[in-house]
Image (cartoon, rainbow, N blue to C red):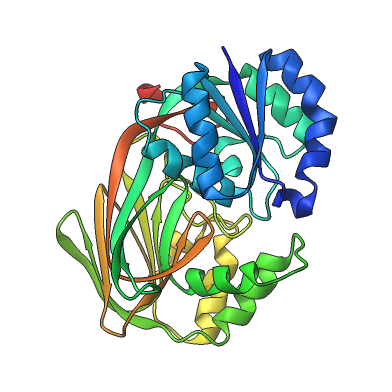
Amino acid sequence: MRTLVIINPNSGKGRAQTIFKKIEGRLFDAFGELFIAVTSRPHEVAEHLDKAANADVNRLITLGGDGTNHVVLNALAERPHLKVAYGCIPLGTGHDWSRSLGMPEDHHEAVDWLAQARPVPCDLGKVEYSNMQPGGKPSTHIFLNIGSAGVSGEVDQRVNRTCRRSSLTFLRVTIATLLKYRPQQVSVFCDGKEFYSGSCYLVVVANGQYFGHGMWIAPKALINDGMFDVILVEGMSRPRVLLAFRAVYRGTHLERKDVRHTQAASVRISSEDGPLKLDFDGEEALGQDLRFAVIPKAVNILLNPSTAAIRRDAT
């Protein structure tokens, strides 16, 4: 098998290329012939994937964060003819997707983990919405991990504008945002039936389990069951929402009466209060009238079934 390695030089606090040099030999020992691409722009990723198709590459590994996953998966979705097994070595601020896979955070151990992994067909999420940043233009995104609307989009916006980030950045920014954020009126339909209508802090449409640097927002989500896990945090007082937020790290927030949970293959979200701030795998957006749909078994993910959050009888 031929392997393309895509490196996002902005990931890992700008240390991606240094980290790659430390693990390059280990990658070669594990996977043999490597094609290396250093790029951080979406159009450059697309160009490298086109070259990979001509070179008969059948394995793709990225060194980057959840945002890198987002860019690569959207480019792959536009190239259904390119059949590759996809794996990642997490370097970004959040690296929440790798948590759902049970992947080690140590980079050398991550290479060893990938060497023992096998491709498993997993789901992707697709969202269509009116993108309000360019004036209501229809937009489509593919997401691997989580799409959400509400306070998470505000958190993304603030984190992405933070020059110096640490392991506590998401925690600090989330608390500061919750203290000021005003819930919006939303209507949410799951598989065509009304799920909720009212004041809301957050709606999460989850394929993976984690977001926001370790928040266990969707503890029951499986990445290959053909369903989203939908989590909604109702409007409530700030003291109560801070208590609900604290429970997210333990995954016990689903036990609260003001946090709703269901599963669905399609989700529609709209707001009476104007555009919603959005988050797709850590990438911020602003939109209205969101329509989510699961794309079952759309991508072969390199993973270890013994550690990943997957449906076992579907592997």
Q: Nearer the viewer, residue 137 or 209?
A: 137
x%, y% of residue 191?
18, 53
In the picture as drawn, the residue positioned furthest to the left comes out as 192
Q: Is residue 64 above or below residue 191?
A: above
x%, y% of residue 271?
28, 77
Give me the residue at 45% from left, 33% from top.
310
Q: Could one spot residue 45 in this view of the protein?
A: yes
Q: Is residue 10 above or below residue 161?
A: above
Q: Is residue 305 above or below residue 123?
A: above
Q: Nearer the viewer, residue 151 or 305?
A: 151
Classify residue 191 as left or right of residue 99. Answer: left
Give me the residue at 65% from left, 72% from top.
161
Q: Nearer the viewer, residue 17 or 29?
A: 17
Classify residue 142 as left or right of residue 11. Answer: left
Screen quadrant of the C terminus: top left
Quadrant of the rendered image containing residue 222: top left
x%, y% of residue 266?
24, 52
Give me the residue at 44% from left, 41% from top.
75
Q: Could one spot residue 306 in this view of the protein?
A: no
Screen quadrant of the N terminus: top right
